[in-house]
Image (spheres, rainbow, N blue to C red):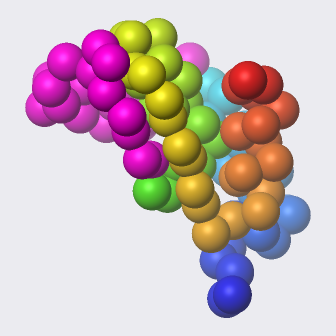
């Protein structure tokens, strides 16, 4: 399977630094707007394609989703998601 830029360790380290900032694009714009568009998640089964570092999957669980499966092309992203959201 062809890997993407997130499996370049230098790029991924810098990406993590950006995402670790409190005021980043995801926290300020992307996620709050996306959350307004999704239906209630209680008892739902969710497939998160392109799960990245697992933040949306964790959100789904916090909102009562029955089961969440996250997949991503990047092995760095999947490893990070497992580390951050060990469940």
Residue 71 position (above or below residue 33): below
9 within the magenta span: no
Residue 35 appears in which quarter of the rendering? top left
Task: Tell me what residue is drawn at x 37 percent, y 34 percent.
Answer: 45
On the image, the x and y values in percent for residue 44 come to 31, 27
Task: Tell me what residue is drawn at x 38 percent, y 39 percent.
Answer: 46
On the image, the x and y values in percent for residue 65 come to 40, 21
On the image, the x and y values in percent for residue 25 come to 41, 36
Residue 13 position (above or below residue 43): below
On the image, the x and y values in percent for residue 8 come to 80, 71
Residue 11 position (above or below residue 34): below
Highlighted magenta segment, given as a residue range: 22-48
42 within the magenta span: yes
Q: Is residue 41 visible?
A: yes
Residue 44 position (above or below residue 47): above
Task: Tell me what residue is drawn at x 42 percent, y 47 percent.
Answer: 47
Give the side of residue 23 with respect to residue 37, left or right: right
Task: Tell me what residue is drawn at x 48 percent, y 29 percent.
Answer: 67
Give the side of residue 15 with respect to residue 72, left or right: right
């Amino acid at each position: 399977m062809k890997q993407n830029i997130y499996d370049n360790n230098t790029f991924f380290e810098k990406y993590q630094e950006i995402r670790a900032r409190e005021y980043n694009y995801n926290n300020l714009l992307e996620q709050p707007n996306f959350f307004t568009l999704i239906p209630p998640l209680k008892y739902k089964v969710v497939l998160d394609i392109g799960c990245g570092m697992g933040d949306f999957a964790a959100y789904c669980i916090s909102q009562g989703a029955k089961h969440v499966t996250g997949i991503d092309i990047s092995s760095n992203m999947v490893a990070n998601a497992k580390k951050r959201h060990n469940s």
